[in-house]
Structures are given as structure tokens and as C-alpha cells.
Image (tube, rainbow, N blue to C red):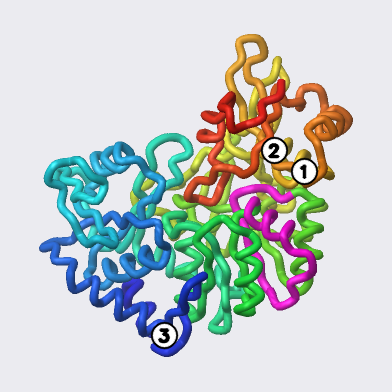
Amino acid sequence: MNYYEMVKKAPADKVLWTDEKNTYCYGEILKQSEDLADRLNTKAKEVIGIYSENPLFQLIAFLACSKQGQIPVILHPGLKETDIETIAEENRIRYLLSEQGLCKKQDGSAKRNLLCKQEDSVPLKKEWCMAALTSGSNGTPKLLYRTYHSWAGFFDTQNKVFQINSDTRLFFQGSLSFTGNLNTVLSVLYESASVVTYKRYHPGKWLSLINRYSVNSIYMVPVKLRSLCLKASEPIPQVRSVFAGSQHIDKSWSDKLLRTFVNAEITLYYGAGELSYVTCTPIKELEKKPFSVGKPFCGIDVFIKDGEIYVNSDFLADNITKPATVHDRGTIDSSGDLLFYGRGEDIVNRGGVQVNIISLENKINSMEGIQSAAVTAVESDSKGEELILFVILDDGFSIEQMRKKLRTDLLNHEMPKSIIEVGKFVWNDSGKIDKKKMRKLIGKNQLKYID
């Protein structure tokens, strides 16, 4: 079984994909995938990197590779040429598929060329049917190889929790190179259901599509979900399921979600590209346990070793050490809930006092007048690490008003060294704020820098 065969089971005339421009039925998408597959004339099983900013082409190319028995991996659209070359050097990627076709590397000058690497760099297993990239937040993205079962074998479980069925019309946003998006879309297609999307970051357009096409399920990372809620001036009653992962949601934020999605079951989960889904919790439980990401899904074993979260299951990426960790920190409480504290870099040392950046961001995001905030740390000779706050303010709310609010509500060791007002955040392909790129903007003329 592969993903092309899975999708082919759906009625040809049922809507699969709707975006800001067009609507496509299953039959149309499969026809485009089959036509593309006929042009993939590799002689042996290969890892094929898919490079495109267009999520629809990403899906079509993924299914075309699946039909031909190849191993597709959707590359992050924002990758630099040097990043792609490094990924290729460390993995057996020799073909790159774009909307211009399947190309070979001949002069080494363009991203759209074949990436010729050593034959024996990564022995390809017969069971591998796809690969995914890590986010690259801690360096060059790595390839995670997967069997069909490691994702599709869990769809029944996750779809029951997230209320995905044949009637689902799910909205997502962003690139399918983000494993959360790709897994969610494939889980919807597993049910022969439909997805709706908008390629760009534009919450007003998202809301318009959600209402126009009677979307009844939403998947987003929390920071995008927050932006959507801020844009919604009234409840969205047709949505029955909202699920989000990767970041904490504070009480004021969860209250806003509950007021916006009045008829929805809202679920927060913990997972990672390496681990798949691990735990989940109804958002209503967060008031009792702010750091909880819930109890493990059925069939998932979770334990803590040296303060880090470890996972063992049949649904891990195939080329990682098992049990597996992505070095997130946490504990398991007496009722079996996993309490998530972030990664090592989310705990910073300020003059001998530890500050949890995730907790601090939640506190700032809950303040009146602040539309969205992100905190990052930079090295300091005197205090170990200093905190930098990037913030988008509500109209009419000034930096000085915000500074007074911070001084009132934050502890001394939580106060940021500098505040930078921005018009928008820089996002990575995982749908998270790209703090590494944000730090590079410090001091540039386009930002308001206030010590």
C-alpha cells in the first residue's frame, strides 16, 4: 500500500482541494499526479526532493512519486542552495522535482538540478515510502524516513480524536514540507474528505475561505490560530473540531478560542516529526494544568529520562534511535499527564535565575494591548543571557504603555533587555516564528529598537 493507492480509493468527483484560486476533485488531482508520474523515468528507487512554494504542486508531486514507488521528500521552500546541497550530501537525494520538471545536476549552479551524491550514503529500505524534513531550527534539516504504516497506521486513532471523517472540510495553512501539515492532509485524504487552504499569511483571507466553504475542522499551530481568532469579530459556529500543537496556549488565549469556536472540540497535542503524535488534551483542561499536553495516545509509550521526554511506539520515523527523544524537557505527573517545559534553549539563565521562555511568552501574549509577542535570548557577558522581546501591538497601544504593563506584571528577571516593535513576524516552514531570522533583524533600520 502507498499514498497514491490510498487516495485513489476516493470517489473521483468528490472535492479534494480548494484554495484561493480553484477547486479540484480527487479525479483531477490523480490525473495530474499520473501524468507527472509518467515523466519520472528513474531506473531505480530514489529519494526525490520536491522543491516548490505551491502546496498543490507539492501534493501532486508527492502522489506522483508514490505511484512510481519512489521516496518523496518535500523540501522547505525557504531553503538556501547551500542548505539543499548539505542535505543532499548527508542523504541519498539525487533528483529534484519542481514545476519545471525532474532535473539532473550538471553544473552545480542551480537549486533545480539533480543533486548527485554517493551511491552508498543512505541504504534505502524497501519499506520506506516517503521522507520528511526536520524543521532545521537547530541546524541543517535532517531527513526522516518513514514506512506507510508509521503514519497511515495511526490515522484511525488520530482521526477519531480530531473528529476527521468523510464529511470533513479541513482548513490548513502553509507548506506541506511542514510534517504537521502533510500528515494532517494525508489523514483527511485517508477518509476521502476535503481540504481548504490559503498559501500566504493572511488571517482575513483565511477567515473568508473558512466561512465561504463551510469549513468544519481547522488545523494550525497555535500562533496562527491566535491570529485567526483576533481577526474573527464573531463566533464561527460551523467548526466542530480545532486541533493544534507545538506550543503552549495560555488561559486568556484558550478563552478566546472557546468564544470563537463555540461548537468545536478544541484539542492541543504534543508531537514531532520524528515522533508522530504523542499526547493530547482538551483545551478546557489547561486551566487546571497550564503546562499539560495531556495523556499519551493509545499505543504510545512515554517516559522521562534525565529530564527529557522519550517516546517508544510503532509510529516513529524509521531511521532514528528508539526509544526516541527530540530533547524536549518535561515531567509526568501523578495522573499520567505529560507536562511540557520546552527544549533546552527555552530555559535561559539570567544572573543565576532560570526563565522559561514559553511561559514568559504566554504571560506577555495574555496582556491587554498586545496582539502577538515572541521572546528570544542573546548572549550577555554580565548576565549570561539577555531577553529580547519582539512584539506586534494593537492599534492605539504604544510601546510606553506596554513597558509600563510589563513592569507591573513581570518579575524583575523576566523583564526583557530590549523591546522591538515589528509589523509582522518571520515564519519558518513549520509555521513557527523563526527566531533565528528575527535575531538577525536586531538593529536594522526597519525595526523600532528600544533599550
Residue at (46%, 76%) from the top-left corner? 22
Residue 357 appears in the picture as rendered: no
Q: Name the residue under label 3.
A: 10
**What is the CA distance from the residue labelled 1 to the residue labelled 2?**
7 Å
Density class for disc 1 (Cα within 10 Å; few <14, some 14-19, many ≥20) is some
Q: In this view, does 222 lie to the left or right of 286?
A: left
Q: Mark 1 points at which residue?
A: 370
Residue at (81%, 65%) from the top-left corner? 259
Relative vertical location of residue 198 with respect to residue 16 in this rendering, above or below: above
Q: What residue type is labelled 2?
A: Val
Residue 288's spot in the image, x, y percent? 82, 52
Residue 164's spot in the image, x, y percent? 57, 75
Q: In this view, does 391 lie to the left or right of 251?
A: left
Residue 260's spot in the image, x, y percent? 77, 66
Q: What residue type is labelled 1?
A: Ile
Q: Under tag 3, what secondary structure? A: loop
Which is more N-terminal, label 2 or label 1? 1
